[in-house]
Amino acid sequence: MKVVASKRDTQGTGASRRLRHAGKVPGVLYGGKGEAQAIEVEHNPLFHALRKERFHASILDMELDGAPERVLLRAVQMHPYKLQVMHIDFQRVAEDQKLHMRVPLHFTGQEGSPAAKTENVLISHIMSEVAIACLPKDLPEFIEIDLSELTVTDTVRVRDLKMPEGVSAVLKGTENPTVVAVTVRGEEAVEEVTAIAPVAADVPATAQKAPTDPAASAGKSDKGGKGDKGDKGDKDKKK
């Protein structure tokens, strides 16, 4: 996919505001062997390109003042409520340096799987994209996951994915996040009740109130009453 951009010399909030009023988007091109360059891109073609999945996970051909650049989309800032692109960042691509990207996951074959044909089974797609590392020439537009053999006892994790040649998942240590989870609805309800019940019954000792003893309360009242009478008797004797 192609992006047409121009260099810009003016920067700052006021300059960016004027660009947007003129139907353009301020941005930055950085990375590679070149210095960071402030750029501007026509808004409408960019807005429509951003609606395509390929634009987010493919190497793009940028024409910068007529000169070719190979770039990746790195960041997009949208207006809070308007359909307007506020700012955009691109990164230059070096053919001999590995890229770290997040690419979308495409799921196929789920409808015909044993899990999908079983009653009271819920198949959840926990992840919609995955972080990968590869050279620019090996960058895939997406990772396809075949779920045609999925059963009610299966859980698909990142390390289970079949990556294209030259592509590896980016993971830390022994982590292995869940991509697809299969849940039997009846079992899910039982687990929830079991998890909640102990919490409801566990009341801290400090939060428990001691029972009130009616007799003790009455005794206190009587003592108070007698004390009042005794005081009155002493006063009468003095008189």
Image: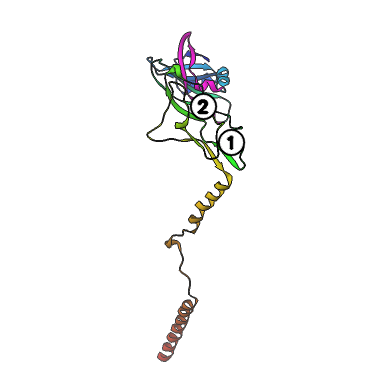
Q: Is residue 38 visible?
A: no
Magenta segment boundaries in residue numbering: 52-80
Task: Pinpoint residue 184: horizontal percent, then vertical percent.
Answer: 57, 43
Q: Earlier in the sequence, mark 1 or mark 2?
A: 2
Secondary structure, mark 1, is loop
Q: Is residue 213 above or below residue 45?
A: below
Residue positioned 45% across, 61% down in the render = 207
Secondary structure, mark 2, is strand
Query: Residue 133's image quarter?
Result: top left
Query: Residue 166's image quarter?
Result: top left
Name the residue at the top extreme: 66
For badge 1, the amino acid type reads Pro
Other residues around mark 1 within 10 Å, as few (<14) / some (14–19) / many (≥20) = some
Task: Pinpoint residue 118: horizontal percent, then vertical percent.
Answer: 61, 40
Residue 174 within the segment the image draws in magenta: no
Viewer-nearest of labels 1 and 2?
Answer: 1
- Report the disc number at residue 104: 2
Residue positioned 45% across, 28% down in the render = 131
* Camera-side residue of 4 and 140: 140
**Marks 1/2: CA–CA distance:** 25 Å
* Camera-side residue of 34 and 13: 34
* Camera-side residue of 72 and 224: 72
Task: Pinpoint residue 144: horizontal percent, then vertical percent.
Answer: 52, 26
For badge 2, the amino acid type reads Pro
Asked if the residue at tag 2 contacts the one at tag 1, i.e. Cβ–Cβ closer than 8 Å, the answer is: no
Q: How is the image coloured?
A: rainbow
Residue beneath disc 1: 114
Other residues around mark 2 within 10 Å, as few (<14) / some (14–19) / many (≥20) = many
* Camera-side residue of 140 and 32: 140
